[in-house]
Image (spheres, rainbow, N blue to C red):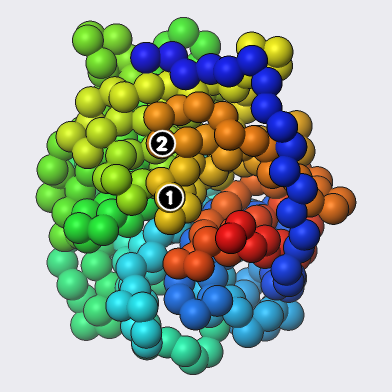
Amino acid sequence: MQAQVLSAVVKRVNIARTINNGQKYITDLKYVYNGRIAVSVENTKVTNPSCLFRDDSIPFLSTHGSCLCVYTDGNSYARFFFWNICDRSVKKCTRSFTYTSYPLPGQLYDSDKIYSVWPLPVVDKSGYTKWPDELTRGYTPNGLAMCKSGAILVCLWNQQVHKRSQGKVLKLSNDGCKLFEMETDKNRPLFVCPTYVTENGNEDICVSDVNAVVVTDAGGFLRFRYTGTQSDPQFDPYGICCDSKNNIIVAEMVKNRIHMIDPNGELLHYIKYKDMHMPRVLCIDEHDNLYIGEWLSEEIKVLSLQ
């Protein structure tokens, strides 16, 4: 099913507050709890992220630029999952999947303190768990998301270009066992290069892909593709999240706008705010406060959608 509309209105929303990120080039953003967020930026020149100026709302900062997902009990405990670069000395970095657990609140924790070793998974003395590279061999990892069930969604890309470019999304248990993978629909590739992923409240799986948001049901069967509007068809989605009404919210960085899509793939409106510039990544809290990371800004913008 191809979801597309002719046009949409713009809904202008005021910025409720800002969070000082201290770094540009944000690549991922995840809500933790109680107004706190986990942030990933692309700045491997930083040797000690703990020394960066930061807002107290950021308990976890990665400078690797890798994607994140977070499990939290909603009160005082969080587990951060992320792709960790093992060797920065080579241009094509080797990455493994790692998670670690921390009490919250507390000091800033950064992913430079995590080191991945092959092959595993095991839980070492420090409590870190590493997954084996067999899960991702031949693919570059991209977005991550935590499901309500505790399973984890993982975006992968085959590192090819043009017509050979293809991706898949894995659904994994949190100990690294593959539950199923989404790669084709009726023998046709589902994805070109899946980048960001989230689970909707109705358990749909929503993926930002090349020129489309691809939405499947909980079992991985295609529901629809959202490809923008007929009046402006060159759609380029990045960060994605879903609100309490199961609407899908996706950032379109190059065109400086955010799409609000209903659960069946119809565009409701664009979200705009003052001085919007290159919104790249999104997350949302339980009160429908939308957190927006702009590529060239050192501040996270927070909007109330209620």
- Image coordinates of residue 115 in percent, x first then y, are 38, 68
Front residue of this view, candidates 144 and 76: 76
For the question of whether residue 13 can be seen, the reply is yes
Label 1 sits on what residue type? Answer: Lys
* Quadrant of the image containing the N terminus: top left
Distance between mark 1 and mark 2 Cα atoms: 8 Å
Label 2 sits on what residue type? Answer: Pro
For the question of whether residue 113 can be seen, the reply is no
Residue found at the far bottom of this picture: 106
- Image coordinates of residue 116 in percent, x first then y, are 34, 63
Residue appearing at x 54%, y 76% in the figure: 36
The answer to whether the residue labelled 1 contacts the one labelled 2, judged by CB atoms less than 8 Å apart, is: yes
Residue appearing at x 37%, y 87% in the figure: 76
The label shown at residue 263 is 2
Q: Residues within 10 Å of mark 2 (few under 14, many from 20)?
A: some
The answer to whether 181 is drawn above or below residue 113 in the figure is: above
Q: Is mark 1 on a helix, strand or loop?
A: loop
Which residue is disc 1 drawn over? 245
